[in-house]
Image (tube, helix red, strand yellow):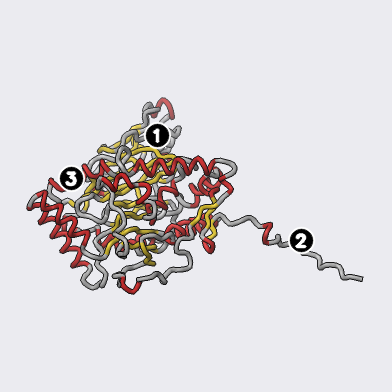
Amino acid sequence: MAEAPPRESASPARREDRPAPLVDAAHGRVSRAIFSDPEIYERELERIFRRCWLFVGHESSLPRPGSFIASYMGEDSVVVWRDARSKVRVYLNTCPHRGNKLCLYDGGRTPTLVCSYHGWSFNSEGRLVGVPFLDRAYGGELDRASNGLVEVPRVATYGGLIFACWDEAQAPLEDYLGDLRWYLDKLLFMESLGGLEVIPGCQKYMMAGNWKLVCENFTGDAYHVASSHASAMQVGVARGPLGQGRTGYFMAWLQPAHGLGWFLTDDSGYQSDLKQAERLGPEAVDYVTERYRRIQEGLREVAAKPYGWIHGNCFPNLNLQGMNSALRGHLLALAHPRGPHETEFWQWCLIERAAPRVVKELVARGVARGQSGAGMIGVDDSENFERIAENTRAPGSRRLTFNYTMGLGREGRWPGREEWAIDGLPGLIGPEFWETGQLHFYEHWATLMARA
């Protein structure tokens, strides 16, 4: 008599019955559900945007006591306000009385903010200082101390960049920035040139698509440039890959989950800037030359000599562009989440204070032509994200995964690596076409999302 087959245990689920992970880093796959599922999005607001350090503004936008700017932390509207003692504070932009939005302006200077609904007023230290008809309405007994503004408990700056964080257990900002600090310090924050300042004005526009699509693009997607931005490259607004057969553009994945793309370790970026500066005049030449000298001085103990980077991301939603030139302007861009299928994109342009006027004017024009709502680069990306969003909503295609297998399992084994000038550069370095940084972005996202 034949033996009966062994009985399968009913307790752990068989492998084929287990749901596929949202992020499968081992196989380079990411579920499309993370870009469309409303429940996942709501968890993001709590587990990503309530726990990470978030960029909220630049110190140059708060020049004096009383200066303020409006910003967001996830979907929470906040006010970044320099108090009477010059301390930078961040408050929820909501009146504790009935929840009305308190600050209705992008920025300005004031000793108090007054609610437009019932007239309650608050000073820059968050205290309730004015209540209309206090005696008649409350019998003079309203507890002002418990009705002040809700303040974000942690605010810190690095190189003029202001970050805020709700989570008391989060690592200090400098630790959170990790390897990214090295690149910021060496290639961007040159205080000897007067530091950075924001060119007045913040450009804001809506983009269809999940916020993560925007941020992964900045993290390290150089692969899309030749296809998506071909027209901008033809007229010189965008810069594409180097000539065939050359290696020189690199990607970097930086702990804990930041990424930089397209930085160059020879002097071709400087030579290109210098050639353009010669057409602008001696002031521009002196500025570009001195800036390059300062960078080289800062890199004197490093074998590799990068000139900057083209795009990058500070996890989760601060994007950095145009850090590879003295004449292109440095963009800080926030991808504010606005539901699973929309992103509100804010961008500022920074320039060194010591740059001559002719350079600042060139930078402002260049930004308007390139990465902007009406430029030749931003619209290309927006259209791609819109089409992706359509397919992550559709019931058939949203069951599929995205493919991030480019370079998977080949880290450190790229042809020609021995010729690359990367000695001394922090982070995991790879070639220009590489999805490792993007995959690590989602791996870190999944780790945070799994925490209770």
Residue 261 seen from this side:
yes
Give coordinates of residue 166: x percent, y percent.
43, 51
Give coordinates of residue 35: x percent, y percent.
50, 47
The residue drawn where x is 50% and y is 40% is 390
Please state which of the two labelled residues, at mark 2 or mark 1, is closer to the viewer: 2
Cβ atoms under marks 2 and 3 closer than 8 Å: no
Query: Front-most of 105 and 405?
Result: 405
Distance from Cα at disc 2 to Cα at disc 1: 54 Å
Which numbered disc, 2 or 1, marks the residue that appears first in the sequence? Answer: 2
Above-or-below relation of 10 to 97? below
Q: Amino acid at mark 3?
A: Leu
Query: Front-most of 330 and 238?
Result: 238
Q: Which residue is mark 2?
A: 10
Mark 1 lies on a secondary structure that is: loop
Furthest-front residue in this view: 244
Q: Which residue is mark 3?
A: 362
The residue drawn where x is 48% and y is 41% is 341
Quadrant occupied by the C terminus: bottom right
